[in-house]
Image: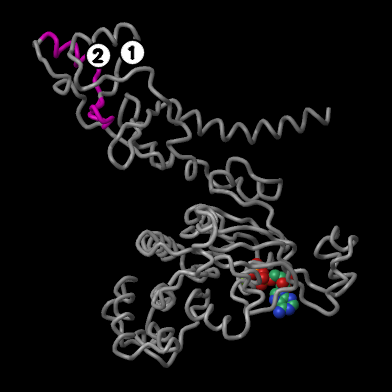
């Protein structure tokens, strides 16, 4: 099933799914004129004025790893849909290369292109693009029919994905009888039915009500956990991009002006344009526990006795210390008060002195979710990994400070500017 190019390269290269290299797409006549040094240095508006050509994609390069959720974000007209159409080769590219699993699809013949579109890629559109006179089942089975899959088999497969997107029971309904959110679930099911390697979604949720939209985003995250496709997701909505993307490419006037993780985009915006975009986004939604966690000065270990623990408390002048197992699993938090009680009661095991109801979080818990934890306890919040191993601790004060700092950074820059004018 896998392309040979996948297994040929080095291990790192084999993880690469899509590589776009110096890609150009220009609409208009005699587009070569746009490649002159003068035009290359000009803005999209100037080029249009001087040549009548629209530079929809200007020298774009980026790479998408296998299994990555890659978001392309930009305002309307920035070239997002054109880029997607180039990757599907629905339109001819002007210059540059697009490699899928190491194969340059710009040199594909018609037969290869058909195979690419039928088997490797699947597309979900903003306007759903369903067949109005076919029921849900036939809409979802359509791609399989085109592939030549026998009726019985394609219906089995279609029912399976209909179930997956939560539309069981709706198989025989026509799209027009479904809500927008449900129609887009059909669109997603249709795309997933052919088991594509790459899923391309062009503003799939832009036409939906905010509440439904949020719900669909959550469902897509869940689906991706399950199916692990390589996803190219287009949006003009920053919050959506930050929520969904493992990495985000920000486009403006046909160029990619920054590629980064949601955190990188928020914390180190590539330039003034990106900064303007992200200034409204709350850091509470993107800065995570791992950014503000610290390594504790000391830990207590389950094999230690109460007296040894007391010695540690004395030498470190602290009120509470986390207790971990032989394998680093977090067992709980011991406070000085409880330890004193334990020793008075002649207890032997530190486990008897654990603080009850200890809140925990993981490395990717966002600050927004840490707030309620922070107010529920006076002790640091432990960060654990999936196996429950202790990774670090977060002070309540760090949560507050990180929020305030974010605000102040913005303000400081403003006052710096003012000072420099003086
Ligand atoms: N077929 C076309 N002919 C001429 N110009 C086009 C065509 N398709 C798109 N464009 C232009 O290319 C630019 C990018 O458009 P598009 O990719 O649709 O942006 P987005 O999807 O980000 O809104 C726009 O300036 C648009 O007007
Ligand atoms: Mg578009």
Residue 334: percent from left, percent from top? 24, 20
- Which residue, given by chain and number where applicable, does mark 2 sit on? 336
Q: In which quarter of the image is residue 323?
A: top left
Q: Would you place residue 309 above or below residue 382 in this image?
A: above
Q: What element carries label 1?
A: loop
Q: Give the range drawn in magenta.
A: 324-344
User: x and y percent of residue 70 in the render?
Assistant: 53, 59
Residue 258 as seen in the image, left or right of residue 48? left
Q: Depth check: 6 or 306 in front?
A: 6
Image quadrant where residue 213 sits: bottom left
Choose the circle earlier in sequence order: 1 or 2: 1
Q: Name the residue under label 1.
A: 318
Q: Which colour scheme is used?
A: one colour
- Image position, residue 217 (x, y; %): 43, 61
Above or below — where is 74 with respect to 202? above
Most foreground residue, 314 or 216: 314
Magenta-drawn stretch contains 336: yes
């Amino acid at each position: 099933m896998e392309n040979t190019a996948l297994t040929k390269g080095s291990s790192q290269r084999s993880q690469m799914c899509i590589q776009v290299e110096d890609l150009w797409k220009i609409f208009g006549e005699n587009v070569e004129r746009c490649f002159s040094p003068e035009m290359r240095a000009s803005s999209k508006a100037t080029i249009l004025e001087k040549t009548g050509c629209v530079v929809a994609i200007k020298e774009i390069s980026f790479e998408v790893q296998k299994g990555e959720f890659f978001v392309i974000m930009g305002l309307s007209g920035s070239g997002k849909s054109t880029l997607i159409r180039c990757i599907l080769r629905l339109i001819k590219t002007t210059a540059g290369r697009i490699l899928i699993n190491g194969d340059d699809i710009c040199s594909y013949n018609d037969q290869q292109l058909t195979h690419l579109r039928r088997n490797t890629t699947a597309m979900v559109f903003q306007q759903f693009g369903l067949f109005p006179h076919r029921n849900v089942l036939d809409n979802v089975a359509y791609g399989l029919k085109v592939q030549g899959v026998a009726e019985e088999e394609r219906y089995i497969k279609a029912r399976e994905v209909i179930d997956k997107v939560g539309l069981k029971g709706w198989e025989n309904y026509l799209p027009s009888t479904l809500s927008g959110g449900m129609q887009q679930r059909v669109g997603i099911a249709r795309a997933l039915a052919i088991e594509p390697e790459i899923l391309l979604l062009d503003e799939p949720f832009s036409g939906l009500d905010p509440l439904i939209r949020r719900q669909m985003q959550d469902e897509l995250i869940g689906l991706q956990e399950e199916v692990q496709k390589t996803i190219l997701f287009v949006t003009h909505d920053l919050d959506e991009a930050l929520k969904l993307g493992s990495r985000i490419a920000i486009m403006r006037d046909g160029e990619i002006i920054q590629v980064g993780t949601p955190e990188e985009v928020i914390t180190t915006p590539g330039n003034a344009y990106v900064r303007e975009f992200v200034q409204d986004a709350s850091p509470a939604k993107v800065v995570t526990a791992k950014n503000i966690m610290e390594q504790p000065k000391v830990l207590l270990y389950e094999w230690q006795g109460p007296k040894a623990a007391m010695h540690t408390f004395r030498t470190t002048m602290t009120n509470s210390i986390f207790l971990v197992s032989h394998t680093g699993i977090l067992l709980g938090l011991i406070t000085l008060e409880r330890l004193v009680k334990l020793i008075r009661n002649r207890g032997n095991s530190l486990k008897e002195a654990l603080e009850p109801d200890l809140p925990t979080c993981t490395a990717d818990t966002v600050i927004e979710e840490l707030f309620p934890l922070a107010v529920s306890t006076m002790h640091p919040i432990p960060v654990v990994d999936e196996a429950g191993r202790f990774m670090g601790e977060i002070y309540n004060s760090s949560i507050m400070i990180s929020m305030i700092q974010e605000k102040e950074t913005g303000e400081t820059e403003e006052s710096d500017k003012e000072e420099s004018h003086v």
